[in-house]
Amino acid sequence: MCRNIRTLFNFDPPATDDEIHAASLQYIRKITGYNKPSKVNEEAFYRAINEIATVSRNLLNTLETSAEPRNREVEAERARIRAAKRFGTN
């Protein structure tokens, strides 16, 4: 599950709220073991996602780096090349 959480820091343009929410959802799914919570746990599950997303946004807005921002397309191509090498696909 957590393989779907991507690095969100130091990209141009910056990570969107949707990307941060998706990463938060994957994190909460991983630590709870729920893909979808039961009705009794639903409120706590979704509240945790929103809280993690808020903390993550604050973190990303606070971090500093001297490195040049990364390009999403370049990073995606690098990931495709790594996958092709690892899994032997073209």
Image: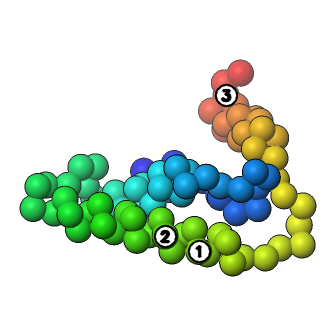
**What kind of residue is marked 2?**
Thr
Q: Are marks 3 and 1 in contact (CB under 8 Å)?
A: no
Q: Are marks 2 and 1 in contact (CB under 8 Å)?
A: yes
Element type where label 1 sits in the image: helix
**What kind of residue is marked 3?**
Gly
| Number of the front mark, 3 or 1 | 1
Residue 61, visible in the rendered structure:
yes
Quarter of the view holding residue 48: bottom left
Element type where label 2 sits in the image: helix
Tell me if 74 is positioned left or right of 57 in this view: right
Give the farthest residue toward the top: 90
Which image quadrant: the C terminus?
top right
Quarter of the view holding residue 37: bottom left
User: Which residue is at a point 11% across and 55% down the rendered structure image?
Assistant: 39
Element type where label 3 sits in the image: loop
Residue 50 in percent (x, y) is at: 39, 65
Quarter of the view holding residue 11: bottom right
Front residue of 16/76: it is 16
User: Which residue is at a point 51% across and 74% down the rendered structure image?
Assistant: 55
Q: Which mark is residue 58?
A: 1
Q: Which residue is mark 2?
A: 54
Front residue of 26/45: it is 45
Residue 2, visible in the rendered structure:
no
Front residue of 1/73: it is 73
Q: Which residue is mark 3?
A: 88
